[in-house]
Amino acid sequence: MIVIASPRVVCFPHPLPLSRGERGADFRPSCPDVEEGEQIPEPASLPNRRGTDFRSRGEFPMKQLTRNLYVETEIRGCNHGFVTTSDGVVMIDSPHKPSDALKLKAAIAKHGPVRYILNTEPHGDHWTGNAFFDAPVIAHEGIRRRILDETDMAEHVARVATFGPEEPELLKGYVPNAPAITFERGMKLHVGNHTFELIPMPGHTAYQTAICIKEEGVAFTSDNIFCKCHTWLQEANPDLWLDSLESLRKLDEEVFVPGHGPICGKDYLPEQGAFIQEWKAYVQSAIDRGMTKDEAIEKLTDLTERYPMDVGQDGMAPGVMKRNVANLYDYLTGKQIWPA
């Protein structure tokens, strides 16, 4: 099922307060063709995982992974990117920091208007920057619900304001740009010469979404992959996560943009799966030894240094460990309330 919150929002950009900075051209995109179950064409070519890094050339603040796809993997927050189509730009997730969102907005303006933003999960590092773009957002219905009904926005804004000296001013009057077009079982979005397939893959959260771009040979996996950095399982269902890793393995796309960490491929899936299984076994062992939840949270620290934390997460490893243990303890003892 596909839900459009307001027909007007589909055809016109999301309005933003003028205080957010330059709004850019007054672009009014046409309504999308979206449908379920249709086959889409095979990719014409596969990308180079390393991509072209325009930072060193001073031309662009992101990596060009394919002819039409740019990604950012080296700043605080989630990995995000955008695709240039024959009918405008489609973003996948957005920066966590407002200042980074404005830099991205300026860079994208060189390529054309933003038609849509696709969000892959409900955590704020994937959607905070939406608000700085005049474009409708598409995501799982659960993501919309989490943003609008279950997020303490004042607390969220206060936390993001600590990320740098520019952020407090940019966050004045903040209003989230929540999904206006939602789905539950997945959807396809056709924009110009590109098709974006949004596939629900629960695991890291109940509403994780993989986004496949056949024409580029690339899939955005969201946080079901933490490549070579510490995995957050603070609200995960580990068994559904393992199922989703198998679903990722079956995709035609061979190159993955993970939620965090460097670009990878299917060869990283066994390592990610093994770490999730190790986490399960680690907490299950504590349960079998009779540890209470509080004892497990305090004592289970052996995995703290297994992987480094992602960019901008320095010093957060002990807290992540505690959250991971708490959630897995509840899951393994049948007390987890999910989706969360």
Image (spheres, rainbow, N blue to C red):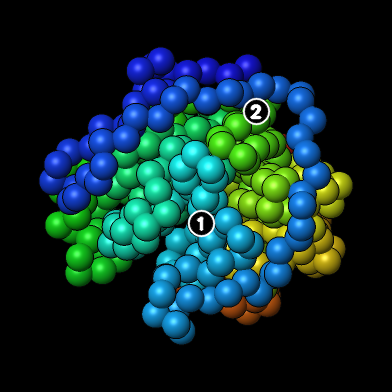
* Label 1 vs 2, first from the N-terminus: 1
Number of numbered discs on residues: 2
**Quadrant in which the N terminus appears:** top right
Residue 34 versus residue 301 in the image, above or below = above
Percent coordinates x, y for residue 144 in the rendering: 46, 30
Q: Is residue 299 visible?
A: no
Q: Which residue is mark 2?
A: 187
- Residue type for callout 1: His
Percent coordinates x, y for residue 6 in the rendering: 39, 16
Percent coordinates x, y for residue 262 in the rendering: 62, 70
* Residue name at image x 53 percent, y 43 percent: 86
Q: Which mark is residue 80?
A: 1
In the image, 289: left or right of 162?
right
In the image, 214: left or right of 113?
right
**Quadrant in which the C terminus appears:** top right
Please tell me whether mark 1 sits on a helix, a strand or a loop. strand
C-beta proximity under 8 Å, tags 1 and 2:
no
Q: CA distance from mark 1 to mark 2?
A: 20 Å
Percent coordinates x, y for residue 27 in the rendering: 32, 35
